[in-house]
Image (spheres, rainbow, N blue to C red):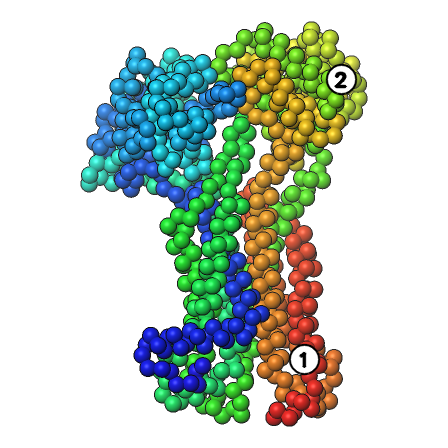
Amino acid sequence: MLGVAAPPGRQARMQHEVRHALRRLVRAPAFTSFAVLTLAIGIGAATAIYSVTYAVLFRPLDIRDLDRVVNIYHSNPRAGGPGHYISMSWPDLEQVRGRQGVFSDVVAWSRVMQPLVRHGEFRLVIGEVVEGHYFDFVGATPALGRTLQASDDEAGAPMVAVLSDRMWRRDFNADPDVVGDTLRLGDAALQIVGVMPASYRGVDMPNVVPTEFWAPLRTIDQLTEPRRDRWIDPEDRWVMVKARLAPGRSADEARAQVQAIGRALDEAAPIGTAAGRVQGSPTSVRHYHVMPAADLRAHESVDAFAMPVAMAVLGAVALVLLVACTNLANLLLARGASRTHEVAVRRALGASRPRLVGELIVDSLLLAVAGGGAGLLLSLWLMHLLSGSIAMGRGLSISVAPRLEPSVLLVALAAVGVSILVFGLIPAWHSTRPALRSVLDQQTGGAVARWRSRRLLIAAQVAVSVALLVAASVFLRQMWVKALHDPGFDLERIAASQLDFAFGEYDADRTRELLHRALDELRRDPAIERAALVNRLPIYFTGSGTGRYVGPQPLVVDSPDAARTARAEGRLASALVGSADVIEALGLRLEGGRAFDEVEVSSAAPVVVVSRTVAQRTFGAADVVGRTIYVGTEPREIIGVVADTDWTRLGARDAGLLVEPGLPDLSRSAVLVARARRDPGIAMVNLRETLRRLDPALPVVETTTGEAIVAQEMLVEQIGSRVVAALGGFALLLALIGLSGLLSYLVASRRREIGLRMALGADRRRVVRLVLGGGLRPVLFGALVGLGAGAALSVFVGFYFYRREPFDWTGLVAVPLVLLPAAVLACYLPARRAARVDPNVALREL
């Protein structure tokens, strides 16, 4: 205790203060538990969310001397977004490589997506085809075997590959003798020469989609569709380029030299069209760009979107942690007010302020250590909870794997340090301020620091909470709108498998026979109501045959502006090509006429079903059954009209829809759809097993359900609403609990004042109103500030995510409806306690 003489010796004095601090905390179990829990949640959430952000965006590339590495792009300076970064052509790369004088090494690579069929399963894998010195450039060494060499990339060299640790374990059962085995990707067979360690993830999208294999750059002709002009056409841009700066050279010098090379090449060997060169088109002018590789985060296509979002989330987490610490600071100030007189006496007797601050901060240090330790354990659980994969379609997914990296530990320690500063050092410094006379003149040491000085802290906590909750309401509102919106089709009981025949060579007749057999088996399945084969699904799977011209007259094919005119007149419609039952299987609503049958499908009859928008735009009426419409240059008889649909995304009515009888183009992609009688999960399992039983090598890139498709469509809203609402709700809960606790301390310290008021005639209702009014005023002020900030934030969120500026009143109305009753309850409990003060007992303490 502060009034007891401290034992001699710094270490003994510290042990003495720690023991007394522990006793004080044990005597106040409610306060101690609340403080530790508050810090644990604040520090744990901050650490976990930063770990996810670091894993996705901030983890550096696995390249030696990364600060000396740059990326070279053929860019589009007018795009300013994902389209800014364009691959280079091979001839231009060779020109840059030969003319430059600022790089010590230049390496080219390209991403490839290949089908892997192994153990009866088909899946797509992402790899990198790279120049022979790629692994020397990045400085990576193999865990087994060897890496690629320059000789592997020479014409006529055997096809070889290096596996990632992930592929080695997943597809080859971590076989230590895998070197020399064969890796079959589609029709290509590559000899495995090495395995990389788990720490190396490639250079394409290592933080979210780690590379699974590496092959020599020249094998791209065998792994992908061969293009004879790939190596000689300056307009075929397909390679990505990284370069290492020579000693003494800077990125600015490299940028200036590479751009000068681009201008010289434009003069010597122009590309594109003359009109494009005049307009500065990126496909007609060599706009080269050099960017430090360390500036690249997840990927060129997402950094512009992901970085502001990540920084906003981290800022919100920091604000919530600050709210937690401020809340505890308020409570510690109130709790330590009873010791103000004791501190003043010790200062008057000669104790130095730093020593008193050190003694007072011991409680905060113990709470911070306990809260930090609990927060670290909580962050590990949250990291596990946040780990996983997010489907991107085509059987691929984004991998999120946060870990307790050194930088993450530093963030946790920084959070503990900020906590000690805010709720420990500041209250201790405030409690020992040199206003000695006013304290010593008081009759007792039980006075609490003025309530007026704490109102702003409560108001700030409420403002932050309300602003976050209002912003979260934008996401929730968007989810609600999408959930209630009628898309024009029914995916709730859908299971679907996408097949992509672009991977490998398939016999069309045999494939057609297999798909017909699959349809027959699915239609006989008691768990499946309808089955159909289509070229694509709405809002998820893309396919061939979209954007067809429709009109009352045939398209003039020799007109150079025909497509532009058709688009301007709204004559383009999405085309759905499918077998019989396609309308019923997808849940399209037939508003007139009929659907086509098996005979019309097998004969490719010139009939079509159109959406209401197509009918209205073409003929000015919805009753068009029996009329002739032109699809391109071909006349079709309209046999049915379906309701309008959201085809590309939920909530966006597209230009129109054509439903044509036939089978999808089996040289590209197709989707097998099954409508379940009850459970789409059962239908999905049966669909997958049917295809695997017919032919395990069928290129099934993904099997999913309609519910999963809709869930992925609302992924942004789900993540945004959950994260922001959780942060805002936690901050609001902390603010209200802190308000209630602070008012309780104030009521306890003002028992004599309340008793005197009641003795002078104040009734219990007036006392309740007095405490309620004092507590609600900062809440109302903070709510007004928070609503204003939240409105501005919701406009930003709406514009950034949805490219519009909605002023959503939902959050501005709903948040106060939740806040005010909770605030009244938080203030009413201390107010009721104040009203129960016995005036006689209180006056005896005077």
Residue 128 appears anywhere in the view: no
Instruction: Give the foreground label among 1 and 2.
Output: 1
Residue 247's disc number: none
Residue 512 appears anywhere in the view: yes
Q: Which residue is mark 1?
A: 834
Left or right, 461 with reference to 586: left
**Rendering coords of residue 730 (x, y %):** 58, 58
The residue nearer to you, when weighing 44 against 22, is 22
Residue 595's disc number: 2
Residue 566 sits above or below residue 605 on the image: below
**Rendering coords of residue 361 (x, y %):** 43, 73
Left or right, 828 with reference to 376: right
Element under label 1? helix
For the N terminus, give its image quadrant. Answer: bottom left
Give the quadrant of residue 29: bottom right
Q: Earlier in the sequence, mark 1 or mark 2?
A: 2
Q: Hey, which residue is sitting farthest left in the picture?
A: 248
The residue nearer to you, when weighing 789 against 429, is 429
For image coordinates 79% across by 24% down, the residue present is: 591
For image coordinates 38% across by 82% down, the residue present is: 6
The three-letter amino acid code for the residue at tag 2 is Ala
Residue 312 sits above or below residue 295 on the image: below
Asked whether the beta carbons under mark 1 and mark 2 sit within 8 Å of each other, the answer is: no
- Dot 2: few (<14), some (14–19), or many (≥20) neighbours within 10 Å? many
**Rendering coords of residue 63 (x, y %):** 31, 37
Distance CA(mark 1)–CA(mark 2): 75 Å
The three-letter amino acid code for the residue at tag 1 is Ala
For image coordinates 53% across by 27% down, the residue present is: 395
